[in-house]
């Protein structure tokens, strides 16, 4: 091409610019493997005279590097400022000249364009760092086949636009979007740090180390800066080649290093890592890991919220990665700031969960009551953040036991305290010996009152925004009659396994949830439950919806209930997304020789008859003389009151298990009342005497009357 220029007054060293030749047109001519340009008079060429001006303008002033390649992919012409070094580029291999990172792939693509003529626009290509520039250059390259007027393939025209800054800006935006989309999906400090490490490696750094203050992981308040060098940190997450310490290692940061300095002033730092860096000697383990990883550039950034330090993040670039620059410090600060807020949210959640778990543990039964007629065991899977599920086993008079399972919706301290309030109310109501449906109705009234108190709080109070909803299931087992009475509010039906191995869902009417808008009553269902049966009740419909769990219950009907609970927990090992509570109860019943039932007459002659029957039964049971006398006294007073103020028929029942219970039943609706008689009064001391000598006494109402009972704890039996 220089020879062509020389014909018109130029030299090899200083070819004459085409625009100096007057109005001419330019036409490429291929001679063998050599490409030359034919210059014609523009006036003779007509409109083609614009061609030379356009080409010269493109090669001189266009913001894109243009390259003309021959069919051998050698550079025929390019812009002077497109040369990557001082060596002349004309005639050199195009892909070698640009120092592309993957020249083979680009060469294959260029040959394909030569073959089929399909234009390839805007292809992102990376080149090695230029002289004096310490970062990879990114080009947006387009390939167009160059053809003569007769359709002959002459070569390629390649445009290369330096988009390094644009690509870095897009990369930073993509990294920020990735961090915001993937970090903080779980409310655990360790999980947040692991998500962060996965998001930034390798997109931003080849190595990352996340170290969090130990107290922060436990949910404690983070310290103010400057942080004492005695404060321990835990290495929570690591991604890279060689780690100076294992993950979860707890250590203190050595003084005089960029890492400790960041916790002093919360200022991120860009640090060049060299063999003679003075701070490496303060942390030999980290220095060894840096050397083995061939790290050469480091950014140390704090994890901080509200001027408090949560931890520190170390970003390393190693081997052939581009070193960090000042723009990277801003990006590191941004992603660390977002991650710090996620860590602080997880820390607060951990603290609240710890407090809520502690409150719930203190408000829950410390251990189930040991009853002679019922064995119980519970399978409890707390789930993330705990919950409001609980159970109680309450001994009632007359050989009866109450099995209660409840579940308050929600999590946290509020849910735990509400659970404690409802549990306290249940114990207070159970002491009144109410029927199960009446007990549930009064419990619902209490829950409704608590819900109204919440609604009356100021709108800015967070508790105002949390509706109170709770479910409950009450089962009262009568060990004498071998029956169960069931009332449920919102929870699923229980599952019953009979002694022979058959199982069935106990069908019972659905009751509304506690504190709900439905004013419907809570109907009770009574069903037989022979000794050896197992009843399973849960806060979810696990026992009734899963045939696998039902099979486990049937197969384990003779096993210890604790082992059956373990089997249920193993079967649910992958279903811990919610709190699960299943209460198992195996009933034994009272033997017939531990119960005496006597039908009494309808006049005061029933009193001595009842005393005689009690005296005789005390002798059979081997009750001591003092306890037998007390029992006769209780029987005398209760039967006398029933005959005087009640209505026939009358029935006396004596029950012996851990306690000795005396029950007198009649059909009267009058309310027995404890009163203190005056000295001159001839009567009115019956219930006062009973309350004085008995351990406990009470009244249980029925649709057709009432039962007045008294309990005593007899001493050791006398030998016959």
Image (spheres, rainbow, N blue to C red):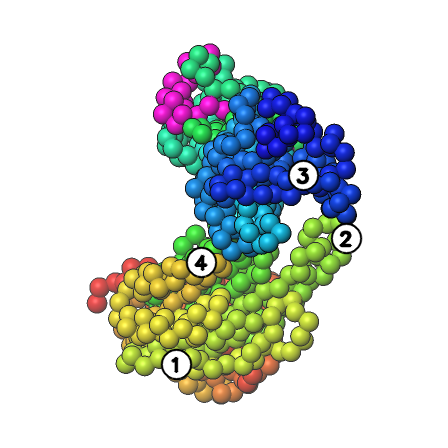
The answer to whether 358 appears left or right of 37 in the picture is left
Gap in Å between the C-alphas at discs 1 and 3?
101 Å
Mark 4 residue element? loop
Mark 3 residue element? strand
Query: Which mark is first along the chain, 4 or 2?
Result: 2
The answer to whether 680 appears left or right of 289 in the picture is right
Query: Which mark is first along the chain, 3 or 4?
Result: 3
Gap in Å between the C-alphas at discs 4 and 1?
26 Å
- For disc 2, the marked residue is 459
Mark 2 residue element? loop
At x 34% / y 61%, what residue is drawn?
Answer: 570
Mark 1 residue element? strand
The answer to whether 304 appears left or right of 658 in the picture is right
The magenta segment: 278-305
Which quarter of the picture shows residue 629? bottom left
Q: Residues within 10 Å of mark 3 (few under 14, many from 20)?
A: many
At x 55% / y 85%, what residue is drawn?
Answer: 704
Query: Closer to the camera: disc 4 or disc 3?
Result: 3
* Residue 256 coordinates in the image, percent (x, y): 50, 14
- For disc 4, the marked residue is 576
- For disc 1, the marked residue is 504
Gap in Å between the C-alphas at discs 2 and 3?
86 Å
């Amino acid at each position: 091409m220089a020879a062509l220029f020389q014909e018109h007054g130029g030299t090899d060293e200083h070819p004459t610019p085409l625009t100096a030749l007057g109005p001419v047109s330019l036409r490429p001519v291929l001679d063998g493997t050599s490409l030359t340009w034919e210059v014609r008079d523009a006036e003779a060429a007509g409109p083609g005279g614009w061609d030379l001006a356009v080409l010269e303008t493109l090669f001189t002033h266009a913001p894109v590097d243009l390259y003309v390649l021959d069919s051998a992919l050698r550079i025929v012409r390019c812009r002077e400022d497109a040369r990557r070094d001082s060596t002349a580029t004309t005639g050199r291999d195009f892909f070698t000249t640009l120092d592309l990172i993957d020249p083979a792939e680009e060469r294959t693509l260029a040959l394909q364009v030569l073959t089929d003529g399909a234009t390839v626009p805007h292809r992102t290509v990376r080149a090695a760092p230029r002289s004096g520039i310490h970062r990879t250059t990114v080009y947006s390259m387009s390939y167009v086949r160059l053809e003569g007027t007769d359709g002959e393939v002459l070569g390629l025209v390649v445009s290369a636009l330096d988009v390094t800054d644009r690509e870095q800006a897009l990369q930073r935006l993509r990294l920020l979007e990735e961090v915001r989309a993937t970090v903080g999906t779980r409310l655990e400090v360790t999980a947040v740090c692991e998500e962060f490490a996965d998001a930034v490696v390798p997109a931003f750094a080849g190595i990352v180390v996340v170290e969090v203050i130990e107290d922060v992981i436990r949910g404690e308040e983070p310290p103010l800066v400057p942080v004492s060098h005695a404060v321990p940190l835990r290495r929570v997450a690591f991604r890279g080649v060689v780690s100076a310490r294992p993950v979860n290692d707890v250590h203190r940061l050595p003084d005089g290093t960029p890492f400790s300095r960041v916790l002093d002033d919360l200022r991120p730092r860009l640090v060049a890592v060299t063999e003679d860096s003075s701070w490496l000697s303060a942390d030999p383990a980290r220095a060894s890991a840096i050397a083995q990883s061939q790290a050469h550039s480091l950014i140390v950034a704090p994890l901080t919220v509200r001027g408090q330090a949560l931890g520190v993040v170390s970003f390393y670039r190693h081997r052939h990665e581009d070193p960090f620059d000042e723009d990277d410090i801003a990006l590191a600060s941004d992603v660390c700031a977002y991650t710090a807020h996620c860590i602080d949210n997880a820390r607060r959640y951990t603290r609240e969960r710890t407090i809520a778990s502690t409150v719930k543990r203190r408000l829950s039964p410390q251990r189930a009551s040991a009853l002679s007629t019922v064995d119980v065991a519970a399978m409890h899977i707390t789930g993330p953040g705990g919950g409001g599920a609980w159970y109680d086993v309450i001994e009632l008079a007359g050989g009866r036991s109450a099995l209660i399972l409840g579940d308050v919706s929600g999590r946290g301290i509020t849910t735990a305290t509400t659970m404690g309030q409802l549990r306290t109310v249940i114990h207070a109501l159970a002491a009144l010996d109410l029927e199960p449906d009446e007990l549930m109705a009064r419990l619902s009234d209490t829950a409704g009152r608590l819900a109204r108190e919440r609604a009356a709080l100021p709108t800015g109070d967070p508790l105002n925004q949390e509706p109170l909803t709770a479910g409950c299931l009450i089962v009262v087992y009568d060990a004498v009659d071998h029956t169960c009475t069931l009332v449920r509010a919102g929870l699923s039906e229980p599952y019953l396994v009979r002694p022979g191995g058959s199982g069935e869902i106990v069908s019972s009417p659905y009751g509304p949830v506690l504190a709900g808008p439905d004013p419907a009553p809570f109907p009770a269902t009574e069903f037989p439950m022979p000794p050896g049966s197992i009843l399973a009740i849960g806060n979810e419909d696990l026992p009734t919806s899963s045939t696998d769990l039902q099979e486990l219950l049937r197969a384990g009907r003779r096993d210890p209930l604790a082992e059956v609970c373990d089997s249920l927990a193993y079967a649910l090992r992958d279903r811990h997304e919610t709190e699960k509570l299943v209460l198992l109860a195996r009933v034994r019943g009272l033997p017939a020789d531990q119960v005496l039932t006597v039908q009494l007459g309808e006049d005061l002659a029933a009193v001595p008859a009842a005393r005689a029957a009690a005296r005789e039964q005390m002798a059979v049971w081997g009750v001591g003389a003092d306890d037998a006398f007390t029992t006769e006294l209780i029987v005398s007073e209760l039967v006398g009151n029933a005959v005087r103020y009640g209505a026939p028929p009358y029935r006396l029942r004596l029950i012996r298990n851990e306690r000795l219970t005396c029950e007198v039943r009649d059909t009267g609706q009058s309310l027995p009342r404890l009163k203190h008689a005056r000295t001159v009064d001839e009567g009115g001391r019956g219930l006062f005497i009973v309350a004085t000598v008995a351990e406990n006494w009470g009244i249980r109402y029925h649709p057709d009357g009432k039962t007045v009972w008294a309990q005593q704890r007899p001493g050791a039996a006398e030998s016959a």
